[in-house]
Image (cartoon, rainbow, N blue to C red):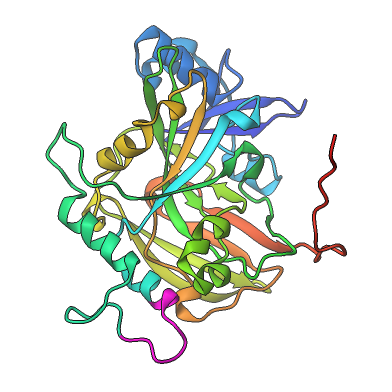
Amino acid sequence: MYISQIRDASGGTRVVVREGSEAYAVAGVDSVRALALDAARAGTSLARRIASLGAGEAVDLEAAAEDGLLLPPVTHPDPAHLHLTGTGLTHLGSAAARDAMHKMEAGQPDMSAEDGPISDSMRMFRMGLAGGRPAAGQAGVQPEWFYKGNGHALVAPGGALAQPGFADDGGEEPEIAGIYVIGDDGTPFRIGFALANEFSDHVMERVNYLYLAHSKLRPCALGPEILVGALPADIRGMSRIRRDGAVAWEKPFLSGEANMSHSIANLEHHHFKYGLFRQPGDIHVHMFGTATLSFADGFQTSAGDVFEIDAPAFGLPLRNPLVRMAKPADAMVAVRAL
């Protein structure tokens, strides 16, 4: 089962459910968040709650995508209460791309060599390999964690990913994101999983890995549909960049626990162990990382490029064009005293 959100003719939001090739609006509910909270309060599953509400009119999701009517598959009426976060160095092979990014330009020893110095990134990755998949019910080693923004930074499928004028780069990161709502008693409930483009500034990050926090403060996009249910263990997708209608770069990406150094349960625990992230009614979008970047292949993105992330298990592909904002005339943001 997949759930999504579209804009209707009156400008309102409709929740859409798709099973197989059939998609329909859910009666009596105006957001995925409201639907999820209803299910949590009733102590039932999303599927049962949807069945109890009943089906509305049929929906053509592909037509909605062509007409620009797709919304992010989850939203919050107050965007400040939707949290965008993520973890890195979680996938087998992810440390190699990160290490290459963080090497000095000249005279740098091989940071990945077994018998030589290793980077902090490689050290963190090896910690995940050793302790990121604990036994059920136990907590493993903490992953790398970062804050990306709130609901104001969330871009709809088809919407533009804007590279700020002060940024050095705008590059894609094809990922899987967990989508969560916090129940009335502070319990995190997983709604499901979606594709994500965790858009970042890799040129800035390469200057010094301590700039990673800055490099992540960019918009991001979620795939059109949320997969409800278990995450497939072995996810295989394709990340592409189209330029002037032609494929300029593409590469397969892998995700799912079969291709990760951390379990999903461990990543979820280390996010939601903080009471700050268990505030009733809040929405969380937590991205689980990637090992595939066009930047790692030396590809340079350009305004007008279209990022495309596609994995059959997640329904419709995620496509977003890149736009570059003009550099500000005044380099400084002035703060006024009150």
| 138 relative to 195 in the view: left or right | left
Does residue 139 lie above or below 102 as drawn?
above
Instruction: Give the x, y percent position of residue 115.
Output: 17, 81
Q: Quadrant of residue 1?
A: top left
Residue at screen point 58% across, 63% down: 307
156 left or right of 116 in image: right
Vertical position of residue 110 compared to residue 44: above or below: below
- Looking at the rendered structure, the number of numbered marks drawn on it comes to 0
Examine the structure image and report whether residue 267 is included in the region drawn in magenta.
no
Q: Residue at x 54, y 29 (%)?
A: 16
Residue 93 visible in the current orientation: no
The residue that appears at 67% across and 73% down in the rendered structure is: 302
Tell me which secondary structure the magenta stretch mostly adopts: loop
Q: Work out which residue is located at the far right of the displayed protein and give it.
A: 329
Q: Nearer the viewer, residue 39 or 47?
A: 39
Task: Please name whichever residue, 327 or 70, is drawn nearer the observer in this view of the structure.
Answer: 327
**Furthest residue toward top:** 42
Q: Position of residue 131 (x, y in %)?
A: 17, 50
Q: Position of residue 49 (x, y in %)?
A: 42, 14
Visible in this render: residue 119?
yes
* Residue at the extreme bottom: 107
* Closer to the camera in the image, 19 or 46: 46
Note whether 67 is above or below 48 in the view shown. below
Location of the C terminus by quadrant is top right
Occupied quadrant, residue 109: bottom left
What is the magenta range? 100-109
Residue 103 painted magenta: yes
Tell me what residue is drawn at x 81 percent, y 65 percent.
326
Horizontal and vertical percent for residue 20?
41, 37
Task: Please identify the residue farthest to the front as the structure is shown.
Answer: 337
